[in-house]
Amino acid sequence: MIWSIAWRNVWRNKKRSAIILTAVAFGIWAGLMSNAIMLGASRQMVKSAIETRTSHIQVHREGFRDHHEIDLMIQEPDSVTSVIKSIEGVKAISVRSVLTGMCRSPESGTGVTLFGIKPEDEARVSAIEDKLVDGSFFKDEYRNPIIVGDDLAKKLDVGVGNKIVVNAQDLEGSIAGGAFRVVGIFNTVSSEFDKSNVFALRNDIDEIYELGGGVHEIAVILNSNDMLKTVDEKLKNSLSNLDVATWEEIEPQMSILTGTQKQMSYIFIGIILLALVFGITNTMLMGVLERIRELGVVLSLGMNHFRIFYMILLETIFLSIIGAGGGMLATVGTIAVAGKTGIDLSIVSAGLEAFGMSTMLYPYLPAGEYPVVALMVVVTAVVASIYPGIKAIRLNPVEAIRTY
Amino acid sequence: MAVIMSEKICKTYNDGGVPVKALKDVDMEIEDGEFTAIVGPSGSGKTTLLNVIGGLDTLTSGKLRVGDKEISEMTPNDLIEFRLNNIGFVFQAYNLIPVLTAIENVEFIMLLQKVSKEERRGRARELLKSVGLEDMINRKPIELSGGQQQRVAVARALASRPRFVLADEPTANLDTASAENLLDIMERMNDEHKMTFIFSTHDQRVVRRARRVITLKDGQVDTDERKGENG
């Protein structure tokens, strides 16, 4: 019956309850949606990084990732690739030569990383082909074809069909230059990537810069990111003489960002709930103060302090849980819609692309977040009920009964 | 046999720094099953006496035994337990819980006593029937008249099967018919269950029905009249 009394007490002053329920619901919705947007954005950032820059795993000679020295090439790449392919969970690989150099057009010049690839392998590993906004992915019969990012193309003032020159150090330590014809322009979500990376055929690179068939990087794509740790462990065991690195090791800042996202989201929700504590406490206090006489009566009849506190606590929990439930339902609904349609943030696209984020954000919140937030709400309700509860049990029954 | 025995009980309030003596050395005995009215002018200490007997208020000095309990020596928590199991209260303003129906109001005190649900419901129905409200058990207080609310309050007071029923101006807000009806019910309960009834009242209708009338004046017993004794 105490549950029933508490429940009915919540609805005594419908207007007041509706206001605080709306505040709780809106606060929870805002907090969860912010988290869903952050989680969605970070998921997209990781996906984009894996698809364009890091793959799931990369294999290099020890030291290459730090210094990008041309002579740090993988010995006997065929045997390495057959080891990689034999591991369960590996979906595709792309063998690349990687050089750093200067890219020039008649208009301008800039430093770039030049990847030598086999288009059919690269298409299975990276999404560069899908990101083409002009030209084709090495389908036209040009000599020394090259694909560049749209930001680089703008900087060099070139388009499809124009020629550019890429100067890089060869194995002898001399500067070698190759003239390439732009056959495609890509646009990924990362403007930084688009400014500084170009893709050419591995055979052409090999010939121009005299690499002798050597390669620097093997990019590995897995069936799922969930297999990352298992495959990484196996590769590290099998290729102990090489540097095997996951995307988390290649871009640790992104790994830290996604790793701390959960804690950040709980802190964020915690701050919102802390603010709500004051509102809920105020509502409950008003509820207690306007029925002092009634509380005096139940004290007189023999309701002990524990039960009175318990009743106030239940009322607070009901109020908070209903509000939070409404907020969560609104969040589920919003994510169901916005998760499909996306949220268009093109108004701030330049800023987002600098961080490697897409301008269309798809909010995402794992189901496991909801029970945690519900628990946080219950804790909030307990905290919010303390002061009104103490106020109620400290009433003097004789004085309380005389209150009107 | 005296079931309530007070020995020089005093109660002094602090009214804005000024001590106010509400009860001064009150010596009194009340027998088991008495139907007693405490009367006196406003400020004579009627309600205070009722409150200390009911364990709602503490004494400043003196000794008070109610049933087999020394009220003057009990802690606040003991007093809550004592009230729950020994005292039935009827207040002037009815004081029903507004969110509960009539039957739930009567059941409420039995819930606090941890009586089983079936027994609670059965006893509450019986009590509401005995006060003539069997057709209104599911009405909320706001849907009942003042007299009906006070009858529910009497049923609630009796639900815990108390030894003592303390009623503070129970008829003050009632018309004559409702007041007489309520007094009939309480008289019947007193006769049938031998519960001790103590009223604090100004109402002559109550005084006429009471079998003993204690008059307080300035916090002291002025007169104590047993009607049977005077014919």
Image (cartoon, coloured by chain):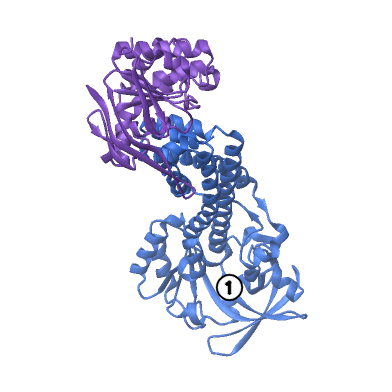
Chain colours: A blue, B purple
Residue A244, above or below A377: below
Residue B94, above or below B81: above
Q: Residue at x 45, y 50 (%)?
A: A383
Instruction: Report the quarter where the N terminus of chain B lies.
Output: top left
Residue in the foreground of this view, choosing between A29 and B151: B151
Quadrant of the rendered structure where residue A227 is?
Answer: bottom left
- The kind of residue tagged 1 is Phe
Q: Could you tell me which secondary element the residue under label 1 belongs to?
A: strand
Assess disc 1: are there few (<14), some (14-19) or many (≥20) residues with their C-alpha within 10 Å of its C-alpha: many
Instruction: Report the quarter where the C terminus of chain B lies.
Output: top left
Residue A134 position in % (x across, y down)? 72, 62
Answer yes or no: is residue A58 visible. no
Residue A65 position in % (x across, y down)? 49, 77
Quadrant of the rendered structure where residue B50 is?
Answer: top left
Q: Which residue position holds label 1?
A: A115
Residue in the foreground of this view, choosing between A368 and A393: A393
Q: Residue at x 63, y 58 (%)?
A: A130
